Amino acid sequence: MSDYLLEVNNLCKRFPIKGGLFGREVGHVNAVNNVSFKIKRGETLGLVGESGCGKTTLGRSVLRLIEPTSGEIIFNGENIVNYDKNKMRELRRKMQIIFQDPYASLNPRMTVGNILAEPMEIHGLNTDKAARKKRLLELLDQVQLPSDALNKYPHEFSGGQRQRVCIARALAVEPEFIICDEPVSALDVSVQAQVVNLLMDLQKDLGLTYLFIAHDLKVVEYISSRVAVMYLGNMVEVAESSELYGNAKHPYTKALFSAIPKPDPNLNKERIILEGDIPSPMNPPSGCHFHPRCWLASDECRSSYPNSTNQSETHQYKCHNPL
Amino acid sequence: MSDKILEVKDLKVEFKTDNGIVTAVNGVNIEVYKGKTLGIVGESGSGKSVTALSIMGLIPSPPGNVAGGEIIYRGKNVLDIPTDEMRTIRGNKIAMIFQEPMTSLNPVFTVGNQIEEVLALHQKELTKQDRKDKVIEMLSLVGIPSPEKRANEYPHQLSGGMRQRVMIAISLACRPDILIADEPTTALDVTIQAQILELMKKLQEEIGMGIIFITHDLGVVAEMCDDVAVMYCGQIVERADVKTLFNRSRHPYTKGLIESIPSFDSTLGETRERLPTIEGMVPSLQNLPTGCNFQDRCDFATDICKGQNGDPLLEKYGSDEHMIRCFNPLS
């Protein structure tokens, strides 16, 4: 087995735009454009970017919850893009997802016990009643919920507790890989820290691998070993967290970091404020998609899309005029 | 101290629910000064938005009810002002920006129309042409490119950041004395948030209004505010100027909030420490403990916090304007 649990090569997802009287395809949106990355076993890759940059689409394409248009997804050494439905279902035991909104992702009519038992039933795990009960209690213990939670309904819990239920549900089938799609952005600050700690503890105890999607750079930076930055469907920079913070090469990464409000009133704030909005992905700017907002843009940036440059083995960026 | 334009004294707001009366705001005191920004921080349900809505006279009644206290604006108690007169103040002298720029604009009117509406209501001396000019002036003031064209567009044609700029233009059209901003950047991306915060600071310098800035993001507080009030379960637990609050917070809750934000330095190096957290969760407002509301989550709680000598009061700490509500303040 290789070091890498997941390898994604040139993944593309293109959504058609339908228009006109007959609903013909009048264009398309490249939500994810030629994205490649690798995740090592037991590692956390963070994925950041502004809304609409394609990070959620990328996460879901990796699980094939959205069918990718082209590209390879190699999980445990096997290309899963052409797996059929049954094989894919089997595989999903190994790859799970935690969604952003713990209010919308739990069925309000099911008790927590049933919610947690459902994935086991689908995958035929712990069919023996006593074993299942034992496993359910073990799961609740892992996410630090009291055992009487089993017979309660989701509305009886707070946001943070519901997110713990979602985490327990993902853990129920003993996955190797979990995609966390903005798992803490709907939570209050004090609860957010609890859930981040829980995710980190579980990773250590169970040897999990995470793809951690968020727009909050502080949280991503904290939890991830490496971070990838996306802009308009493209991955513009990947590096180890500390390297990315201290030595960003792409101007967009730099601007993103400088835009975060720092909780320290004594700091002298010199920040880069990007002009304008994110362009529409339906009609992206020519050349480097970032050039209309970039203060370093040159003629080259307007005409050609930059190739990936290796700064070091772990640090890649796509920019004509790196910092 | 500079001019005080608004003072909220001992405000108490109750809501009737099926399970009895819930006190959402319990004895809040705040002051707003000309050209200064007061931050109100707290988790969801701490009463920060309800405080803001009572200042605007917008508490839905029933089920809501301002049960006590005074809100003094220009020597008058806002709570005693008749509805008609309140209408001439609201949106004119005291304006508000809401969290969701998507839902707070009317989708069937152009943005120019919506800015004009405020002017038509509050500045009746303006002619139609004056108003049109003013709309363009406001749109360019908030940094919207080609304002003549944008004035004729509908909200759905604008991005989130642009909509929030329009909201700011509407609220500032009458040059208010006080601007209440209720989580104005929570729904926006960080790069757009930076633009909007910068804009609000610039406009405050120009117009000189006092801002009440409600947020749960302490980073934003550090950037924007002069004074800060931290709320927990409907009460202010700590109040200080921004530097004191971040450097020398004395309430365990404030300290916990500040520490639970991941900072970039903490990730440098191999050993990743666990984030300090505040254990447990916010108690239900219907079932508050006697004594200090924070006792169950506090590492420093002692018997006195259980309320044997009554509830903790918001008291001066040291010589400056620093106030805390705690029996066992941090040293």
Image (spheres, rainbow, N blue to C red):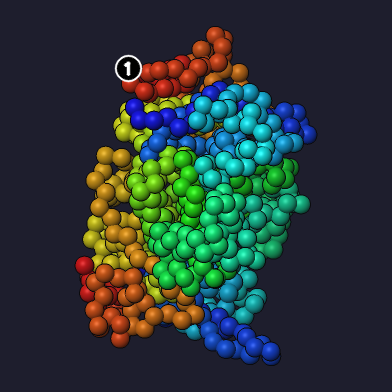
Compared to A89, does A15 lie above or below?
Answer: below
- Left or right of B149, for residue A153: right
Q: Residue at x 73, y 42 (%)?
A: A151
- Residue B118 position, x and y percent, is 57, 53
Q: From the viewer's side, name the closer residue of B131 and A313.
A: B131
In the foreground, B318 or B19: B318
Q: Is residue A61 left or right of residue B66?
A: left
Secondary element under disc 1, as helix, strand or loop, is: loop
- Quarter holding the N terminus of chain B is top left
Write the residue at 44% across / 17% down: B315
Q: Give coordinates of residue B245: x percent, y percent.
A: 36, 31
Confirm whether residue A56 shows in the render. Answer: no
Whether residue A60 is visible to the viewer of this picture, yes or no, is: yes
Location of residue B207 with respect to B52 vertically, above or below = below
Residue drawn at x 39%, y 80% as measured from the top left:
A285
Give the residue at x 65% y 66%: B108
Provide the chain ID for the residue under circle 1.
Answer: B
> Residue A91 placed where, x, y %?
58, 70
Residue corresponding to mark 1: B319
Q: Residues within 10 Å of mark 1 (few under 14, many from 20)?
A: few
Pick the quarter of the image with the C terminus of chain B.
top left
Looking at the image, residue B82 sits to the left or right of residue A302; the answer is: right
Q: At label 1, which amino acid type do we have? A: Ser
